[in-house]
Image: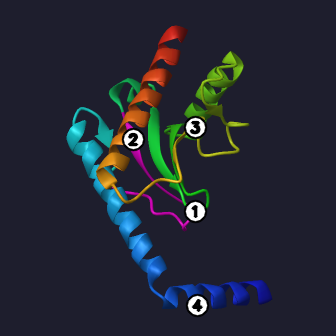
């Protein structure tokens, strides 16, 4: 119990100055606005109704381009808190779909993006770092980087999957 107690004392100390709460609120506000941005700009695609806030490990929302949705695949726009970076993930709507597509990517030796080590070891099939150490000083530029990187990732995934048919 000592480690938990020590961690809580450290947590309390950092919360007292208020910077963590302000940063977390700002990040959640930005993430919600990013989700709304994708929803408005890409009305033909489905965007999840909410943001998964996580346990200060990751925050994400799902984006379903039509071409991937019909394959029961979705894209996650993810912020990894500890790594302090944005990533984009391809994942299935369930573990069965996840395993099916993981096998396709894994057996192809496709080296364009990071493929999960096993279909069950991570939340993704394929991942890609969009922005390492993002600059939150210009949110419009950050949003543009995330959008462009996400669209390129989707295009590459679609091209790979279309070559299989």
Residue assigned mark 3: 127
96 relative to 40, above or below? above
State the separation of the CA atoms marked 4 and 3: 35 Å
Of residues 29 and 119, which is closer to you in this image?
29
Nearer the camera: disc 2 or disc 1: 2
Residue assigned mark 2: 145
Q: Position of residue 97 (x, y in %)?
A: 56, 32
Crowd rating for badge 4 (residues with CA inside 10 Å; few <14, some 14–19, many 20+): few
Q: Earlier in the sequence, mark 1 or mark 4?
A: 4
Residue assigned mark 1: 57
Q: Where residue 93 is drawn, which disc sits there?
A: none
Q: Decide if residue 1 is in sight here.
A: no
Is label 3 in a helix, a strand or a loop?
A: strand
Q: Position of residue 22 (x, y in %)?
A: 40, 77
Q: Earlier in the sequence, mark 1 or mark 3?
A: 1
Of residues 117 and 80, which is closer to you in this image?
80
42 relative to 62, above or below? above
Residue assigned mark 4: 13
Q: In which quarter of the image is residue 44?
A: top left
Number of numbered labels in the structure image: 4
Q: Give the range drawn in magenta.
A: 49-64
Of residues 71 and 37, which is closer to you in this image?
37
**Position of 15 compared to 110: left or right?**
left
Is label 1 in a helix, a strand or a loop?
A: loop
Nearer the camera: disc 1 or disc 4: 4
Q: Which residue is drawn at 51% across and 86% down?
A: 15
**Position of 47 compared to 114: left or right?**
left
Crowd rating for badge 1 (residues with CA inside 10 Å; few <14, some 14–19, many 20+): few
């Amino acid at each position: 119990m000592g480690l938990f107690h020590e961690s809580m004392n450290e947590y309390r100390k950092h919360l007292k100055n208020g910077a963590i709460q302000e940063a977390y609120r700002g990040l959640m506000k930005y993430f919600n606005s990013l989700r709304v941005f994708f929803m408005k700009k890409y009305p033909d695609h489905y965007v999840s109704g909410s943001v998964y806030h996580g346990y200060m490990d990751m925050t994400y929302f799902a984006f379903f381009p039509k071409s991937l949705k019909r394959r029961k695949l979705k894209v996650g726009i993810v912020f990894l808190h500890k790594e302090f970076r944005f990533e984009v993930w391809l994942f299935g709507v369930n573990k069965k779909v996840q395993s099916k597509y993981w096998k396709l990517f894994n057996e192809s030796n496709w080296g364009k993006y990071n493929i999960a080590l096993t279909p069950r070891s991570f939340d993704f099939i394929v991942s890609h770092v969009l922005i390492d150490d993002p600059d939150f000083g210009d949110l419009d530029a950050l949003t543009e980087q995330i959008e462009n990187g996400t669209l390129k990732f989707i295009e590459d995934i679609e091209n790979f999957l279309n070559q299989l048919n």
